[in-house]
Image (cartoon, rainbow, N blue to C red):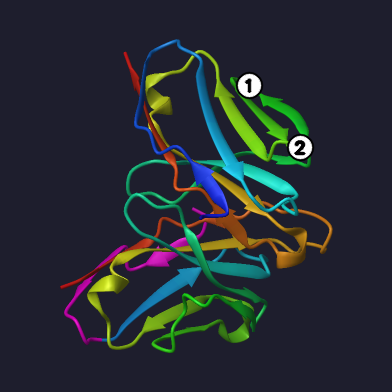
Amino acid sequence: QKEVEQDPGPLSVPEGAIVSLNCTYSNSAFQYFMWYRQYSRKGPELLMYTYSSGNKEDGRFTAQVDKSSKYISLFIRDSQPSDSATYLCAMILLTNAGKSTFGDGTTLTVKP
Amino acid sequence: DTGVSQDPRHKITKRGQNVTFRCDPISEHNRLYWYRQTLGQGPEFLTYFQNEAQLEKSRLLSDRFSAERPKGSFSTLEIQRTEQGDSAMYLCASSPRTSRSSYNEQFFGPGTRLTVL
């Protein structure tokens, strides 16, 4: 079993919809939780990161971490066609010098 | 453009050949990471450098793989005697100096896509 599990989708929503993306993990020692966006044939781009439990909001994006359930979420409000991409969650153990453990990504398509 | 750059962007080679990829990190970033990403999977950690020192290697990095970061600037990843299973996107990322108790963003390059025929 992988340390980080992510539903691969694909997920297709109409423009303007609220999108919910999720990951579960098994290692309770993870301390930083990141969401990356990856367009086809490009490198991942960091969207948001969260330390420990709680919520963090940045524009249309909200990240939530529930360490008790080992569950993280990314919400996208008012989704746009330009949000169509693969979304990767990633996690870091601080003792591992920034080495990230990634989920396998969820492919999102936002239809105009 | 002052981001992470990788060269080449694409490489097609025949099984058994050696290939070398280069990564130029963002200036002043002392940490450099290599990841491998296959289709439909997330990136998997291969190795990382702090300045010129290679501090950790994944068990994914067989003895056919070697990475260097001379003078703590650019890095190279060499694969000897390539196999079809080596076909993947090889991603490089860099981050600035960080303490053990803090997080600094890793900036990823565009990757080198390797196809082994």
Q: Earlier in the sequence, mark 1 or mark 2?
A: 1
Residue kind at label 1, given as amino acid type? Gly
- Name the residue located 47 percent from the left edge and 57 percent from the top edge: B43
- Name the residue located 63 percent from the left edge and 63 percent from the top edge: A99
Res B101 quadrant in image: bottom right
Percent x, y for residue B99? 82, 63
Camera-near label (1 vs 2) is: 2
Label 1 resides on the chain identified as A
Q: Quadrant of the C terminus of chain B?
A: bottom left
Residue A95 appears left or right of A91: right
Q: Examine the structure image and report whether residue A25 is included in the region drawn in magenta.
A: no
Please say if B43 is above or below A33.
below
Mark 1, Cα crowd under 10 Å, few <14 / some 14-19 / many 20+, is few
Residue extending furthest top?
A16
Res B73 quadrant in image: bottom right
User: Where is mark 1, residue-wise?
Assistant: A59
- Name the residue located 59 percent from the left edge and 41 percent from the top edge: A24
Res B106 quadrant in image: bottom right
Percent x, y for residue A69? 70, 36
Label 2 resides on the chain identified as A
- Range of residues picked out in magenta: B1-17
User: Where is mark 2, residue-wise?
Assistant: A68
Mark 2, Cα crowd under 10 Å, few <14 / some 14-19 / many 20+, is few
Query: In the structure shown, which secondary structural element does the residue marked by tag 2 occupy?
Result: loop
Please say if B83 is above or below B115.
below
Numbered label attached to residue A69: none
Please say if A61 is above or below B19.
above
Residue B97 appears left or right of B24: right
Q: Examine the structure image and report whether residue B9 is included in the region drawn in magenta.
A: yes
